[in-house]
């Protein structure tokens, strides 16, 4: 049996080396992990006791047991817990408590993911000395913030270090954890000395823009178009809007991000908005009713709410209006701002719609789908053809047992992060309009889209 701190199979010190890439999508509400070898990628079941997509989603909560041990949530009541781990780090990247909480959480996730991967894939990798790489994503809107990038890199590196320790971390380790926040080369704590051979080299830890990671499979597919694209990623906490161009320079390619927004308009905030609306109308009468709006794994759709509370869906749609108007307005404003600034330099032919991807957990919610379709209608004019809405193509090399291709958008960031950074092409954030796009002419209908989302 593989121990949590192990990074190598026994007796492989002198075996041939094999590069292994861990793609860790450190989400606001959920964290996902995909681990890849040379030819296959494996989605990791972080909660194997569950079923469907939930088995691959680890809630972003660091719990503390009765005896002070840090651990991942098991779904049971805990004495105490820490949440908002990613947002706290983004908002206060220099905060020692934000860094420690995030690093300990990542350490617990890495232990679980690595152990499961090594046990399940022994037949493929058991005779190799594994050379580990770790990539973590960062929202494109934050990617120019060097201090934040450095904080994420350090936390990823520290998370791996802590995952290699052969004992659990507890609240008594606060002094030790604060002491190793400095770069690893100056960290001399004796606790670390016994695990140094399991550490990951700093150059094998990468921070990638999430928009680049989420579209890797599309950029490498036959459906790829060298033009501007819209990505709307609806997470539990945040709505990410990215307008980016794919540029083919012959021997290399580039992602040019012309606009990026991260907004608190994710599925949880929509649920909170609905809860407030329901309370104001006297539809919520007890705690169990209110709980329907707070369970992250299964936030109800309009149809489910309609059946439970005996209210027509059209009324719920009206309640959603003010919230979804913010979603639509921000998407339209982003498109219009880039159109005004760059015009024909980056937009596709006027007789072609803007290639658009919906990603994240909220991509399956009819409320968000409907709003993006309304944006498409609102942006259709004589010189503009709205949006061509499609799902991300499922890569053949990804193994995610128990799921269909329709679930890939939930794991797309983690999958993209399993790629070697040097092979992904350049990422240029907030391009200045000087990049020339070689827009391919109308093979578009055949290549990009078969039909819109229904």
Image (cartoon, helix red, strand yellow):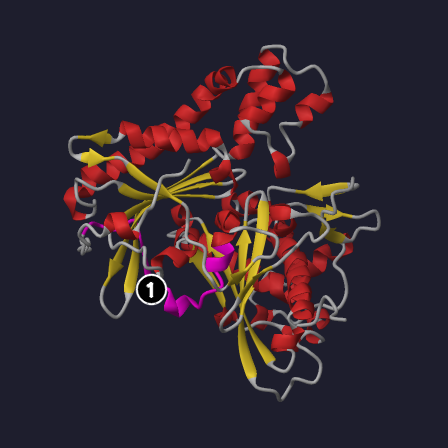
Q: Is residue 305 above or below residue 226?
A: above
**In the image, is 235 to the left or to the right of 80?**
left
**In the image, is 251 to the left or to the right of 281?**
left
Q: Quadrant of the N terminus?
A: bottom right
Where does residue 262 sit, x and y in percent of width and height? 43, 40
Q: Is residue 8 magenta?
A: no
Nearer the observer, 146 or 226 = 226
Q: Residue at x 76, y 47 (%)?
A: 64
Going by the picture, which residue comes out furthest to the bottom? 14
Where does residue 139 sit, x and y in percent of width and height? 44, 48
Residue 84 sits in quarter: top right
Mark 1 packing: few (<14 Cα in 10 Å), some, or many (20+)? some
Residue 368 sits in quarter: top left
Q: Residue at x 22, y 52 (%)?
A: 443
Going by the picture, which residue comes out furthest to the right? 67
Determine the secondary structure under disc 1. Answer: loop
Q: Is residue 275 visible?
A: no
Label 1 sits on residue: 425
Q: Is residue 45 above or below residue 350?
A: below
**In the image, is 272 to the left or to the right of 447?**
right
Residue 232 sits in quarter: top left
Q: Write down the region rendered in magenta.
A: 413-433
**In the image, is 160 to the left or to the right of 166?**
left
């Amino acid at each position: 049996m593989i121990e949590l701190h192990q990074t190598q199979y026994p007796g492989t010190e002198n075996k041939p080396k094999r590069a292994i890439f861990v793609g860790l999508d450190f989400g606001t509400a959920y964290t996902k992990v995909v681990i890849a070898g040379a030819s296959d990628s494996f989605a990791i079941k972080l909660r194997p006791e569950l079923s469907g997509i939930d088995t691959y989603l680890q809630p972003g909560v660091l719990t503390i047991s009765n005896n002070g041990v840090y651990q991942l949530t098991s779904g049971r009541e805990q004495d105490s817990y820490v949440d908002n781990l990613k947002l706290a780090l983004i908002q206060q990247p220099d905060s020692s408590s934000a860094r420690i909480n995030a690093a300990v959480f990542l350490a617990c996730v890495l232990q679980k993911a690595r152990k499961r991967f090594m046990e399940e894939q022994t037949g493929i990798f058991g005779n190799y000395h594994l050379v580990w790489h770790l990539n973590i994503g960062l929202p494109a809107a934050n990617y120019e913030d060097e201090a934040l990038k450095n904080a994420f890199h350090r936390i990823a590196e520290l998370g791996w270090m802590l995952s290699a320790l052969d004992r659990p971390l507890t609240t008594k380790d606060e002094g030790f954890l604060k002491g190793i926040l400095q770069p690893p080369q100056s960290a001399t704590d004796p606790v670390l000395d016994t695990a140094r051979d399991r550490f990951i080299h700093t150059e094998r830890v990468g921070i990638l823009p999430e928009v680049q990671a989420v579209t890797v499979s599309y950029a490498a597919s036959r459906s790829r178009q060298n033009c501007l694209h819209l990505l709307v990623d609806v997470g539990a906490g945040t709505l990410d809007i990215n307008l980016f161009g794919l540029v083919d320079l012959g021997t290399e390619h580039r992602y040019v991000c012309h606009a990026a927004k991260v907004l608190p308009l994710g599925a949880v905030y929509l649920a909170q908005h609905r809860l407030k609306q329901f309370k104001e109308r006297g539809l919520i009468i007890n705690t169990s009713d209110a709980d329907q709006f707070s369970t992250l794994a299964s936030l109800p759709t309009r149809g489910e709410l309609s059946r439970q509370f005996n209210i027509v869906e059209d009324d719920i749609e009206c309640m959603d209006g003010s919230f979804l108007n913010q979603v639509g307005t921000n998407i339209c404003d982003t498109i219009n701002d880039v159109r005004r600034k760059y015009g024909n330099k980056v937009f596709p032919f006027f007789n072609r719609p803007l290639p658009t991807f919906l990603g994240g957990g909220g991509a399956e919610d009819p409320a968000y789908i409907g709003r993006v379709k309304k944006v498409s209608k609102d942006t259709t004019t004589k010189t503009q053809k709205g949006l061509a809405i499609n799902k991300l193509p499922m890569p053949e090399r990804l193994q995610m047992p128990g799921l269909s291709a329709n679930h890939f958008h939930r794991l797309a960031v983690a999958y993209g992060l399993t790629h070697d950074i040097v092979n992904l092409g350049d990422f240029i954030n907030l391009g200045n309009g000087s990049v020339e796009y070689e827009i391919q002419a109308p093979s578009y209908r055949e290549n990009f889209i078969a039909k819109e989302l229904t």
